[in-house]
Image (tube, rainbow, N blue to C red):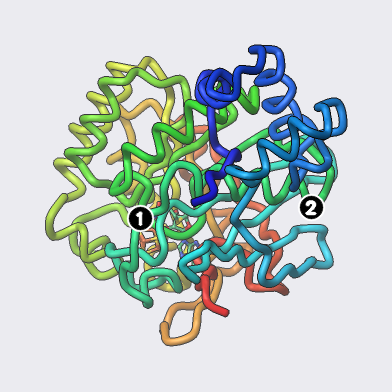
């Protein structure tokens, strides 16, 4: 069976070169080809001797992930449907923002999602399986190989609930940090609010940003959008968030999708401001992206601005998420991950 080099740490690659009786420097070279030069085959590692490459190829390949479909949006956003050897696929999105040099990869953590929020396309599919840490890493490498560019930021906002695959997400995070040299502060993990896992994550005292999909200011409205509210209620969530902020010292991000005439009223804004009063956070308002089979509509721009103003008045920093890639269904919550 061939092993895959992508997703291995330097010390894991050193084990391979040790077994081949090669120097540790060879491991460094291989590591560099994979993470800095983003090659897709061993043959491209031209500073390794040909016979060494042949020997390496007997047991290893660089990658097993394939680009099934690639779509480029008019705003430059690229969406990839990536296939793994078992035939399962996930979507990964590369976003660029004109005024910044950042290249942000929006990665998936699971095939499908068990949380099944009523507004989200991913949830409609149910849960298929967790991704391994290597499969998560392969998404960023696929982007780098395809574009020849270095990803600078990673957000776990693709398909799946990252905290329900925490071990693999943490392993991937470590590799992003040490092997890709993407600073922890440039990585965001978004969760629907799995309280026990937020508590577990708090113990790691990560410098990465935790984003919480709140989406409503009270139990009743939130339960309509997210059935998870019935297991982990918004009031208990507050305690978990306060504990998280206390442990990590980090400001969190609160995500709030703006749905017309549902959660975008003046009263909702006031109630949200009260809920967030003691929580050290920035707020990210997300204009709702329409998804088939749901009745929800996007709030008007005017309403979003009023809502923003009320929250700002309460002392919060508020941003409105730029809509990226809507013309290729690459926006938040539109990822289905099907061929
Ligand atoms: N499962 C995690 C991370 C993936 S979803 C989570 O739910 O947080 C990333 C973000 O997109 C979440 O805030 C999610 O609520 C939001 N989202 C899902 N469907 C959406 C839609 N149709 N329009 C806008 N945002 C959506
Ligand atoms: Fe899963 Fe997040 Fe979609 Fe909810 S919004 S179904 S948690 S991916």
Mark 2 vs 1: CB contact within 8 A: no
In this picture, residue 141 sits left or right of residue 201: right
- Residue 185 seen in this snapshot: no
Residue at x-position 53% and y-position 62%: 84
Quarter of the image with the C terminus is bottom right
Q: List x then y, in percent, for residue 120.
A: 42, 70
Q: List x then y, in percent, for residue 297.
A: 50, 77
Residue at x-position 54% and y-position 70%: 334
Q: List x then y, in percent, for residue 234.
A: 20, 48
Residue at x-position 28% and y-position 47%: 193
Residue at x-position 32% and y-position 73%: 126
Give SS at disc 1.
Answer: strand
At label 1, counting other C-alpha atoms closer than 10 Å, the crowd grade (few under 14, some 14-19, many 20 or more) is many
Give SS at disc 2.
Answer: helix
| In front of the other: 21 or 296 | 21
Q: In this view, does 27 lie above or below 339?
A: above
User: Does mark 1 have its CB less than 8 Å from ligand 1?
Assistant: no
Q: List x then y, in percent, for residue 311.
A: 46, 42
In this picture, residue 286 sits left or right of residue 245: right
In this picture, residue 81 sits left or right of residue 76: left
| Residue at far bottom of view | 293
Task: Name the disc covering residue 11, or none.
Answer: none
Q: Is residue 17 above or below residue 58?
A: above
| In front of the other: 339 or 305 | 339
| In front of the other: 265 or 85 | 85
Task: Name the disc covering residue 130, or none.
Answer: 1
Task: Name the disc covering residue 146, or none.
Answer: 2
User: Does mark 2 have its CB less than 8 Å from ligand 1?
Assistant: no
User: Splitting the image into four quadrants, where does ligand 1 fall?
Assistant: bottom left
The answer to which quarter of the image holds residue 323 is bottom right
């Amino acid at each position: 069976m061939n092993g895959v080099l992508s997703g291995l740490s330097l010390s894991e690659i050193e084990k391979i070169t040790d077994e081949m009786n090669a120097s540790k420097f060879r491991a460094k070279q291989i590591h560099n080809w994979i993470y800095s030069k983003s090659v897709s085959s061993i043959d491209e590692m031209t500073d390794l001797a040909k016979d060494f490459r042949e020997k390496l190829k007997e047991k290893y390949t660089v990658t097993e992930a394939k680009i099934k479909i690639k779509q480029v949006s008019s705003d430059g956003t690229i969406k990839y449907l990536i296939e793994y050897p078992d035939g399962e696929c996930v979507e990964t999105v590369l976003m660029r923002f004109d005024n910044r040099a950042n290249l942000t990869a929006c990665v998936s953590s699971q095939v499908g999602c068990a949380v099944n929020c009523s507004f989200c396309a991913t949830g409609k599919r149910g849960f298929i399986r967790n991704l391994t840490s290597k499969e998560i890493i392969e998404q960023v490498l696929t982007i780098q190989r395809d574009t020849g560019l270095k990803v600078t930021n990673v957000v776990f906002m693709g398909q799946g609930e990252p905290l329900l695959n925490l071990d693999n997400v943490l392993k991937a995070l470590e590799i992003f940090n040490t092997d890709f040299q993407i600073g922890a502060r440039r990585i965001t993990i978004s969760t629907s609010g799995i309280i026990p896992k937020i508590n577990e994550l708090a113990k790691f005292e990560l410098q990465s940003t935790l984003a919480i999909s709140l989406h409503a200011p009270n139990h009743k409205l939130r339960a309509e959008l997210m059935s998870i509210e019935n297991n982990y209620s918004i009031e208990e969530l507050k305690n978990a968030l306060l504990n998280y902020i206390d442990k990590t010292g980090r400001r969190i991000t609160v995500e709030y999708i703006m749905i017309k005439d549902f959660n975008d009223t003046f009263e909702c804004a006031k109630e949200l401001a009260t809920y967030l009063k003691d929580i050290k956070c920035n707020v990210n308002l997300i204009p709702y992206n329409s998804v088939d089979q749901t009745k929800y509509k996007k709030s008007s721009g005017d309403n979003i601005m009023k809502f923003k103003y009320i929250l700002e008045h309460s002392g919060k920093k508020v941003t409105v998420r730029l809509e990226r890639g809507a013309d290729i269904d690459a926006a938040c919550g539109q990822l289905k991950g099907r061929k």
